[in-house]
Image (spheres, rainbow, N blue to C red):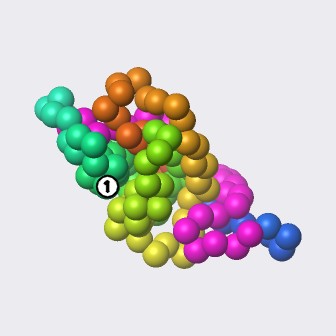
Amino acid sequence: MENKMEHINPDGLIKNPAFSQIITTEGKGKTIYIGGQNAVTGNREFVGKNDILKQTEQVMKNLEIALNFCGVNFENLVKLNIHIAQGQDAYGAFQVSQKFLGQSANPPIITVLYVAGLINPEFLIEIDAIAFKPIK
């Protein structure tokens, strides 16, 4: 069986270049689950106090580190769950994330939630991810 990851945007659902509606995976592979990432570096330094844009950039860097460690990149993303503290600029955060996600022909599925707060009151955004690594 051939390894395959299919991005589907059926008629009747919104078509948007920033996200896909459905992704299926088939064949041999490894599913990678990445826990919620926030704006803390590997050295436990908090980045971007009161700045959703700087925090989003650090979150995306953390996701990139996790993906690369598993031998994949943003092209292998299947799903992102994005939690944004209520009152923050989701559009600005989205713009920052696009520097990492690029203009992929096959973007991941994305769910965005405004939340009352995150575990640390200074955190303005947290993102967890699912990726798929085909194995040959």
Q: Is residue 6 visible?
A: no
Give the labeled residue for mark 1: 53
Given the image, on which type of amino acid does mark 1 rest? Leu
The reply, left or right, for residue 73 in relation to residue 27 is left
* Residue 79 percent across, percent down from the top left: 57, 50
Residue drawn 41% across and 42% down?
Answer: 125
| 105 magenta-colored | no
The reply, left or right, for residue 118 in relation to residue 47 is right
Residue drawn 58% across and 74% down?
Answer: 17
Q: Which residues are magenta?
A: 14-42
Residue sitting nearer the eye, 67 or 99: 99
Circle 1 — which element?
helix
Name, please, the residue furthest toward the front: 87
* Residue 42 percent across, percent down from the top left: 19, 34
Neighbor class of circle 1 (other Cα within 10 Å; few <14, some 14-19, many 20+) is many
Residue drawn 85% across and 70% down?
Answer: 12
The reply, left or right, for residue 123 in relation to residue 9 is left
Q: Is residue 112 visible?
A: yes
* Residue 54 percent across, percent down from the top left: 26, 52
Above or below, 77 against 106 in this view is above
The reply, left or right, for residue 116 in relation to residue 42 is right
* Residue 114 percent across, percent down from the top left: 55, 42
Residue sitting nearer the eye, 136 or 101: 101
Name, please, the residue furthest toward the top: 119
Report the quarter where the N terminus lies. bottom right
